[in-house]
């Protein structure tokens, strides 16, 4: 499990504050997000009505439902499945770096949604540059040869390098 990055956690919390337009309650990263209420409010701010019901009180299972609803909403928003944390990662504080990665990924995904005009998180995402090659261009690329691509090495060899299981003489 990777170690925690406090700077990344602070960057994620600052982004969440900027998106929500309000200060987060004081406390550690895992304590602030543990009940899932802020996460649900965050995804609702990015994509309205993503999470219809947010539990603000109740037992552990009620609060864990908030986290599960957030996970489903970010999956629909476009966050890759492998970057989404498990409910226990946050609620039981098992893998906080994965939670940070998920929210960071969510911040990056906002760049792909033109309807969202707020702050983004992370580097600019690459855009697809589709290229269409006609038959002549494909043949030229396939039949072309680049410098040393075919293995020519100007007479260099490994002669004198020694063979396996032999000592090196100095």
Image (cartoon, grey):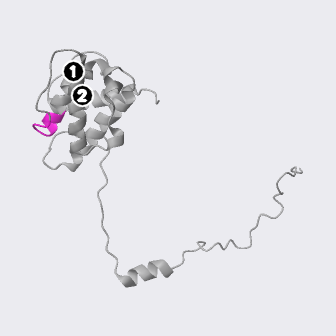
Label 2's element?
helix
Tell whether label 1 touches label 2 (CB within 8 Å): yes
**Rendered position, 124 above or below 138:** above
Q: Position of residue 27 (x, y in %)?
A: 28, 15
> Which residue occupies 34% across, 81% down?
134
Q: x%, y% of residue 63?
A: 21, 21
Crowd band around label 2 with a 10 angstrom C-alpha radius: few (<14), some (14–19), many (20+): many
How many numbered discs, if any? 2
Name which quarter of the figure residue 103 lies in: top left
Q: Which sits in the foreground, 59 or 121?
A: 59
Residue 154 visible in the displayed image: yes
Which image quadrant for residue 90?
A: top left
Q: Does the segment drawn in magenta span residue 36? A: no
Pick out the residue farthest to the right: 169
**Disc 1 element:** helix
Residue 150: quarter of image: bottom right
Judged left or right of residue 108, residue 114 is: left
Residue placed under numbered mark 1 in the picture: 63
Q: Is residue 165 above or below residue 140?
A: above
Q: Which residues are magenta?
A: 43-50
Q: Which numbered disc covers residue 67?
A: 2
């Amino acid at each position: 499990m990777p170690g925690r990055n406090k700077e990344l956690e602070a960057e994620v919390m600052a982004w969440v504050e900027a998106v929500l337009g309000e200060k987060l309650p004081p406390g550690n990263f895992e304590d602030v997000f543990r009940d899932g209420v802020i996460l649900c409010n965050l995804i609702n701010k990015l994509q309205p009505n993503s999470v219809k019901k947010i539990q603000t009180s109740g037992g552990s299972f009620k609060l864990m439902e908030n986290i599960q609803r957030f996970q489903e909403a970010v999956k629909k928003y476009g966050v890759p499945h492998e970057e989404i944390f498990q409910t226990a990662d946050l609620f039981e504080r098992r893998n906080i770096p994965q939670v940070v990665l998920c929210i960071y990924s969510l911040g990056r995904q906002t760049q792909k949604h033109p309807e969202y005009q707020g702050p983004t998180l992370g580097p600019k995402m690459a855009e697809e540059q589709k290229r269409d090659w006609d038959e002549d261009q494909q043949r030229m690329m396939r039949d072309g040869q680049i410098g040393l691509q075919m293995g020519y090495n100007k007479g260099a060899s490994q002669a004198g390098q020694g063979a396996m299981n032999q000592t090196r003489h100095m």
